[in-house]
Amino acid sequence: MKKSFIYFLLLVLFLYLFSCTQEQAKEDKILAGINDCNLTIDEFQYQLAAELEMDEDFKLTKEVKKEFLEGLIRKELLIQEAKKLKLDGKEKFIRAIERYWESTLIRDLVEMKGEEISNRILISHKEIETCYNDMKKPQKKLPPLAELREKIAEELKEKKKTRMLKEWIDDLRKKAGIEINEELLL
């Protein structure tokens, strides 16, 4: 239960950071007031920029800005209603946040470790040539090595990275103190 409480605190912090501000708005320009919450122009622009980053086809017009603002207002109203009904404290909600938090944390760790590993990987000319020759055997007609060199190097690097990530994870498991009660699995 202590773990659930920590996740709940993280959730509250998350909702606080990405929800409307209530008191901070004294210095910031308030774009919209939604009940007791204020949406500042800075927060609006931050969320709009995040949306633009995810959708390259997003056209930024005055009408689109108004629609985006309406969407944020609807979202805030729904969040406020859910909080009023205390849905943010229900076990189902907390477990969903835990799963999201865990998967995001794992994704970020694997990305970080993957970049670290990737920066250490070197692919030799011999490895590229060997791979090219292996590709040539079943396929008689193949573009020249010069045309495929970069693609082959990327594929080899990705394979090495995947193998090294797996070895790293296996090593974490070997070093960990893990005890399994097999009787409970029956």
Image (cartoon, rainbow, N blue to C red):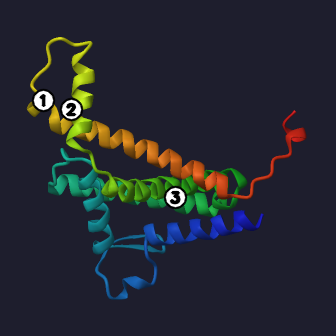
Can you give x and y, in whole percent of width and height, for residue 169 in the image?
55, 50
User: Horizontal placement of 9 versus 72: left or right?
Assistant: right
Residue at x 43%, y 57% (from the top left corner): 113
Q: Nearer the viewer, residue 101 or 75?
A: 101
Mark carried by residue 105: 3
Residue name at image x 64 percent, y 66 percent = 8
Instruction: Estimate the spatial distance between the alpha carbons at disc 2 and disc 1, rounded to whole Å.
Output: 8 Å
Q: Mark 2 or 3 closer to N-term? A: 3
| Quarter residue 74 falls in | bottom left
**Secondary structure of residue under mark 1:** helix
**Labels 2 and 1 touching (C-beta < 8 A):** yes
Q: Nearer the viewer, mark 2 or mark 1?
A: 2
Task: Give the labeled residue for mark 2.
Answer: 129
In percent of width and height, residue 1 lies at 78, 63
Amino acid type indicated by mark 2: Glu
**Residue 6 place in picture, x, y as percent:** 66, 69
The answer to whether residue 101 is left or right of residue 30 is right
Kindly report the distance in space between the C-alpha atoms of the residues bearing marks 2 and 3: 38 Å
Question: Residue 182's x, y, as percent?
Answer: 85, 40
- Provide the secondary structure element on which disc 3 rests: helix
